[in-house]
Image (cartoon, grey):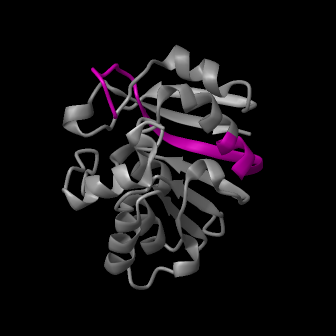
Amino acid sequence: MTDFLSDEFWNNRYVDGNTGWDLGEISPPIKAYVDQLENKELKILIPGAGNGHEVSYLFDQGFRNVHVLDFAPLAMQTFLERNPEFPTSQAHTANFFDFEGAFDLIIEQTLFCAIDPCLRSSYAEQSASLLRNGGKLVGVLFNREFDGGPPFGGSKSDYVDQFKPFFSEVSMEECYNSIGPRQGNELFIRLTK
């Protein structure tokens, strides 16, 4: 097993403060999507949530059935300390690929780019299995390559090929509202099971 597939690897990233993916707030493309959601009853999962800025924002906006999932125990502990009102029953320290549930919406922020690219088809299949019929996977993927990794990049055509077998509708567009350093390097995805 490659070390970046272990909870110890990711936990050590938090211990060392090596969290360059963390924006310190909700990602602007995801915030824009969340801000147009009207149904506060949606059951939402944010896997690989790290410090959980998207989770905190959703919860503060009145989404009470939001679930946070991360591999790293320290990330989950820190999230719960920063969000004492968040229900611990909706905070899951687990491997995404072993997780079970039925959700209306999964929000992708940084998990997909953190896993080994050979697992991307498995990620697509697992995401679909966690969604109810008609459920959506939305979020941000890198639209560029990186030397080494994680993060691991890719291209729209590769992503479409990986997701299409598991989703009835696949939409990917360049983000118009990425943060400055990521301008032109992110795709906003909207996939429907």
Image location of residue 34, percent across then percent down? 49, 55
**Residue 37 visible within the image:** no
Rendered image quadrant of residue 8: bottom left
User: In this picture, is 184 found above or below 54?
Assistant: above
Magenta stretch? 126-150
Q: Residue at x 28, y 45 (%)?
A: 21
Whether residue 155 appears in magenta in the rendering, the answer is: no
Image location of residue 91, percent across then percent down? 52, 71
**Residue 137 visible within the image:** yes
Q: Residue at x 39, y 62 (%)?
A: 52
Rendered image quadrant of residue 152: top left
Quarter the C terminus occupies: top right
The mark tally for this picture is 0
Work out whether residue 183 or residue 79 is closer to the camera in this orientation and state it: 79
User: In this picture, is 54 found above or below 91?
Assistant: above
Work out whether residue 49 or residue 98 is closer to the camera in this orientation and state it: 98
User: In this picture, is 24 found above or below 61?
Assistant: above
Q: Residue furthest front?
A: 1
Image location of residue 175, percent across then percent down? 39, 32
Rendered image quadrant of residue 54: bottom left
Horizontal side of 120 relative to 127 (left or right) equals left
Q: Residue at x 61, y 47 (%)?
A: 97
Q: Residue furthest right?
A: 133
Q: Residue at x 43, y 21 (%)?
A: 154
Image location of residue 84, percent across then percent down? 39, 84
Horizontal side of 104 relative to 51 (left or right) equals right
User: In this picture, is 179 found above or below 86?
Assistant: above
Q: Residue furthest bottom?
A: 85
Whether residue 127 appears in magenta in the rendering, the answer is: yes
